[in-house]
Image (cartoon, helix red, strand yellow):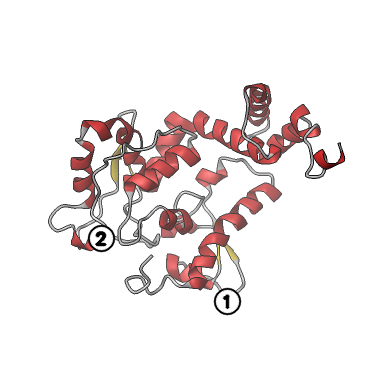
Amino acid sequence: MDRARFPGFDDALRQAMFEEPVRFIVDVVQADRSVLEFLDGRHTFVNPVLARHYGLSIPPVASNQWVRVDDARAAGRGGLLPMSVFLTANSPGLRTSPVKRGNWVARRILGERIPPPPAAVPELPADEATLGELTLRETLARHRADPNCASCHQRFDSLGLVFEGFGPVGESRTLDLAGHPVDTRAVFPDGSEGSGVAGLRTYIHAHRQEDFLDNVCRKLLAYALGRSLMLSDEITVRDMRARLDANGRKFGSLVDVIVTSPQFLNKRGPGDLATQ
């Protein structure tokens, strides 16, 4: 990230960005709330540095203190999707990247398997400020016209275009770096339309919620077991999904299934092999 172009992006803000999702997830886990709050949460946690970045008003607190903001939607935040850490990590530095942001949603949120790009992929402009008359959306549309690129890009470009209201460091904006008005509209892979993060949430709930819940189960089980999942784990994944549906999708129901599963109860510890 070019700190000369983004002087507000200093070490304090960078650290606050990393800490925000940790505090949010810990809050959901400790309160045993629905895993859908990862998508739908109207709140977030900020310290003074992150609050300034988001344009949120909070009571005067020390620089290292964090507070919960219950109506973060008023500033376009709330839940994991619009958190700056993800928006910034999926931007190349001097522009946004609907491709990287959309690919992140498809893979990390919805659990899709996206093949790697072909070797000779045409590069998009590195600096958003030099786009000229074309917007990044229009430039990307030309890129997507290449048959070698279209099949994959149709799966995730729209999932990233909804974030164009956030700049390269996750800042809210109405103009891109070239001075063009931002456009957050998208036609999603199923043909439905939406705009911004709200439109993405609506699309996921209407058409991809089962994918999201399945992905949460798989990611959590793989984390708990410390390995990639195998075919024999599918029974546990199904049990996790059934327990979620029966218990208001509360996070604790997933933990209950995992810690009583044969895979977890018979998992080898770090020193087990050395004693055999």
For this orientation, the residue located farthest to the left is 133
Helix, strand or loop at mark 1: loop
Q: Which part of the image, by quadrant, shows the C terminus? A: top right
Which numbered tag is attached to residue 127?
Answer: 2
Report which quarter residue 260 is drawn in. top right
Of residues 149 and 240, the one nearer the viewer is 149
Is there a contact, CB below 8 Å, between mark 2 and mark 1? no
Residue 246 horizontal side relative to residue 124, left or right: right
Residue depicted at 33% across the width and 31% down the height: 189
Q: Which residue is mark 1?
A: 63
Is any atom of residue 12 visible in this view?
A: yes
Can you say whether 104 is above or below 93 in the image? Answer: above
Callout 1: 10 Å neighbours few (<14), some, many (20+)? few
Q: Earlier in the sequence, mark 2 or mark 1?
A: 1
Q: How many marks?
A: 2
Q: Position of residue 62 (x, y in %)?
A: 60, 78
